[in-house]
Image (cartoon, coloured by chain):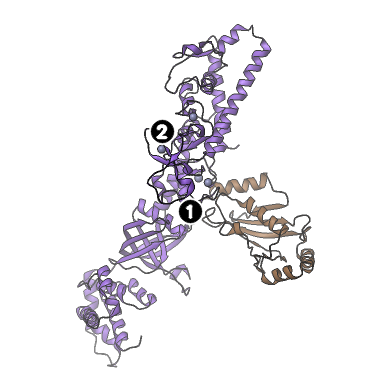
Chain colours: A purple, B brown
């Protein structure tokens, strides 16, 4: 196997294979029977124990939903940190941990074989050899006669196998004899052997890396936490056995597989570290890279107006999760259904100008979709765009209004134009109206429509968007949020630089509505 | 944006080269490691026997969360493959799982050549022929294989 963290010689272990042999073997011991895990089950609380050591299932009480036959049986969790009742159907053999334990058992068996063959060859009279390999448990005098093969690791493992190494016994008296150095090297060789042979068993089947923060499903399958949450974005089924995952809707509530975490930190500490750094760097790249604005191509949003979204597409679930962990902001863009050219970007699938939305509230529903309440902040233009994990990201520049002096200058220039040649020219009239009149024109229209109980001004709408604002800067955004006209028409508001331009657009809409041309 | 190639794709590609599947090859393009030229041999005993079919396979940006996109480039007479080379195969759609891989998908496609399923057709005309006159359909499939799917020198 070609591994990231180098060869056996250079790979670091998380503990001293010789000096901390007892500590390592403890990681392999079931807390219930003190033997190395046999067909381990990892419980929903992240603790593991042998399948045989599962407490007897009892009929669960007070549970009427979901009334599935195999969920009626419960198990009282024996771990003091949990003590909850787990559904018996959620307690299945942990496939990865089981394989790791099998591999470790094979490695030890191999060394034991080599040693016992050697012993046999040298004959039982070779006292010195026997002394070398002798180990005994201090606090269990009865076992002091047990003859054990070479190395502390193997000695402790075999004691555990025989059920003679209680979990809390810290001291094993190893007979260091004359060849302490060879024992030490035997321990290191064995430990590296375990590290090598167990590694393929903790390969995540989604990312093909060492599992980082392993999460074990109730069906007994394990993936990295990040991979599991990506899978959940797409499907509620286990990718390996296709059973319904039935994990909590937020994977964050599901604990890591504690035993696998401890073993990984011990056997492959550098790989765990490297993996964690890579994952962090990837997230960082997406959060702070050149194209760092997540883009949701969906609909129009307006500054300081609420937008409610339902996020159900897998790629956008991931985007939402990243946003919630980061800046809580993303850009919303309208879908370019007619493939109109968008400046330098060409006929991309979105309109080039959008609005940044800040997440006010996000509610995750049981089916994995989310209801998101947002409020618009700034407008922006996409200058470059790319893709991250299926959703659009981009480099954006914010669009700001001109300053007040410029706004005033433009108003003065426009209102001082001579009257239009054609008195019927609506646009020419609008262009000459003072900014405040343009606002009033809009507000009066709204009032008139309210008087006529227009549908789009029902209480329900006003509850969401509020009363028409007096702020001329915001009135057009509010108006566009409630007025039932085409999105393409509303889009014009986003590419404005003056309050006055926006009010002219809304005034033109009103003129068109009043002349019944819509 | 050209994101670095995920470890998974690198490993899958490596394994396709080092442990090739008999009768199947997949070669990534030099300029696009997500785009593969695929060759699948018609299974022995099937009406595609002796044929070498080329396909194109593309790993989308969110692979393996979404399945590879794959289609036949060689013309083929098959009830589950349409005129554009698109393939009707459950594991390429709803039954995709990120635990599957390029290798397993190509094996499924090879198996589909060995077991056409006119009950779940993508190509209605071919499926109809397959159901009404299987002998004739198989004959056509053989002819097409000779005509379009001969290994290039
Ligand atoms: Zn528990
Ligand atoms: Zn046990
Ligand atoms: Zn993973
Ligand atoms: Zn499973």
- Measuring from the top left, give residue A29's x and y in whole percent: 48, 27
Question: Relative to residue A403, is residue A194 depicted above or below?
Answer: above
* Side of A493 relative to B76 (left or right): left
Report if the beta carbon of the residue with label 2 is closer than 8 angstroms to ligand 1: yes
Give residue A454's quadrant in the image: bottom left
Mark number displayed over residue A236: 1
Which residue is at the front of the view, A310 or B147? A310
Q: Which residue is mark 2?
A: A78
Q: Is residue A169 visible?
A: yes
Which type of secondary structure does the marked residue at label 1 adopt? loop
Question: Relative to residue B99, is residue B124 depicted above or below?
Answer: below
Which residue is at the front of the view, B80 or B60? B80
Mark closest to the chain's N terminus, 1 or 2: 2
Q: Label 2 lies in what chain?
A: A
Q: Residue at x 56, y 35 (%)?
A: A99
Q: Is residue A8 visible?
A: no
- Measuring from the top left, give residue A213's x and y in whole percent: 45, 41
* Side of B81 relative to A324 (left or right): right
Q: Label 1 neighbourhood size at 10 Å, few (<14), some (14-19), many (20+)?
A: some
Q: Label 1 lies in what chain?
A: A
**For the residues marked 1 and 2, what is the alpha-carbon distance in whole angstroms?**
29 Å
- Measuring from the top left, give residue A498's x and y in whole percent: 27, 73
**Front label number (1 vs 2):** 2
């Amino acid at each position: 196997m070609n591994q990231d963290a180098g060869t056996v010689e250079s790979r670091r272990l998380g503990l001293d294979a010789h000096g901390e042999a007892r500590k390592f073997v403890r990681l392999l011991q079931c807390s219930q029977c003190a033997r190395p895990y046999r067909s381990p089950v990892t419980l929903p609380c992240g603790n593991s124990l042998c399948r045989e050591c599962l407490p007897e299932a009892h009929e669960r009480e007070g549970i009427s939903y979901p009334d599935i036959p195999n969920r009626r049986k419960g198990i009282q969790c024996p771990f003091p940190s949990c003590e909850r009742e787990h559904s018996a159907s959620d307690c299945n053999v942990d496939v990865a941990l089981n394989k790791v334990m099998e591999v470790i058992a094979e490695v030890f068996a191999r060394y034991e074989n080599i040693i016992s063959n050697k012993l046999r060859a040298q004959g039982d009279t070779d006292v010195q050899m026997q002394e070398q390999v002798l180990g005994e448990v201090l606090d269990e005098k009865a076992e002091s006669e047990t003859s054990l093969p070479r190395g502390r690791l193997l000695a402790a493992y075999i004691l555990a196998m025989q059920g003679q190494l209680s979990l809390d016994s810290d001291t094993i008296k190893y007979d260091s004899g004359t060849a302490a150095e060879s024992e030490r090297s035997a321990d290191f060789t064995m430990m590296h052997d375990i590290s090598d042979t167990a590694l393929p068993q903790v390969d995540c089947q989604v990312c093909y890396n060492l599992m980082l923060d392993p999460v074990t499903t109730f069906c007994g399958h394990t993936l990295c936490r990040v991979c599991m949450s990506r899978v959940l974005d797409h499907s509620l089924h286990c990718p390996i056995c296709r059973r319904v995952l039935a994990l909590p809707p937020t994977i964050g509530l599901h604990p890591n597989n504690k035993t696998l975490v401890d073993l990984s930190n011990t056997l492959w500490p550098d790989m765990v570290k490297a993996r964690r750094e890579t994952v962090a760097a990837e997230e960082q790249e997406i959060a702070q890279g050149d194209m760092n604005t997540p883009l949701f191509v969906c609909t129009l949003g307006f500054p300081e107006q609420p937008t409610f979204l339902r996020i159900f597409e897998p790629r956008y679930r991931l985007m939402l999760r990243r946003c919630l962990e980061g800046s809580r902001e993303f850009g919303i863009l309208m879908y370019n259904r007619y493939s109109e050219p968008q400046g330098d970007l060409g006929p991309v699938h979105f309109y080039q100008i959008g609005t940044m939305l800040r997440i006010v509230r996000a509610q995750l529903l049981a089916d994995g979709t989310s209801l998101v309440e947002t409020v618009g902040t700034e407008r922006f233009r996409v200058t470059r765009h790319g893709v991250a994990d299926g959703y659009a990201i981009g480099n954006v520049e914010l669009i700001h209004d001109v300053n007040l002096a410029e706004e005033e200058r433009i108003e003065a220039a426009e209102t001082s134009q001579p009257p239009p040649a054609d008195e019927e020219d609506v646009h020419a009239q609008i262009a000459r109206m003072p900014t405040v009149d343009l606002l009033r024109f809009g507000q009066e229209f709204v009032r008139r429509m309210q008087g006529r109980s227009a549908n789009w001004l029902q209480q329900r709408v006003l509850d969401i968007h509020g009363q028409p604002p007096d702020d001329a800067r915001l009135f057009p955004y509010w108006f566009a949020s409630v007025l039932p006209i085409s999105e393409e028409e509303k889009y014009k508001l986003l590419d404005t630089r003056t309050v006055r331009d926006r009010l002219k657009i809304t005034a033109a809409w009103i003129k068109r509505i009043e002349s019944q041309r819509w | 944006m050209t994101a670095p190639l995920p470890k998974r794709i690198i490993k899958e590609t490596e394994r396709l080269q080092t442990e090739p599947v008999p009768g199947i090859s997949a070669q990534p393009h030099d300029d696009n490691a997500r785009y593969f030229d695929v060759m699948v041999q018609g299974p022995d005993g099937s009406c595609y026997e002796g044929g070498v079919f080329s396909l194109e396979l593309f790993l989308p940006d969110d692979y393996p969360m979404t399945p590879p996109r794959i289609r036949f480039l060689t013309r083929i007479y098959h009830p589950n493959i349409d005129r554009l080379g698109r393939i009707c195969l459950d594991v390429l759609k709803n039954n995709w799982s990120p635990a599957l891989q390029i290798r397993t998908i190509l094996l499924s496609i090879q198996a589909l050549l060995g077991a056409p399923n006119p009950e779940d057709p993508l190509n209605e005309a071919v499926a109809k022929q397959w159901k009404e006159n299987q002998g004739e359909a198989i004959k056509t499939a053989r002819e097409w294989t000779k005509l379009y799917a001969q290994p290039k020198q």
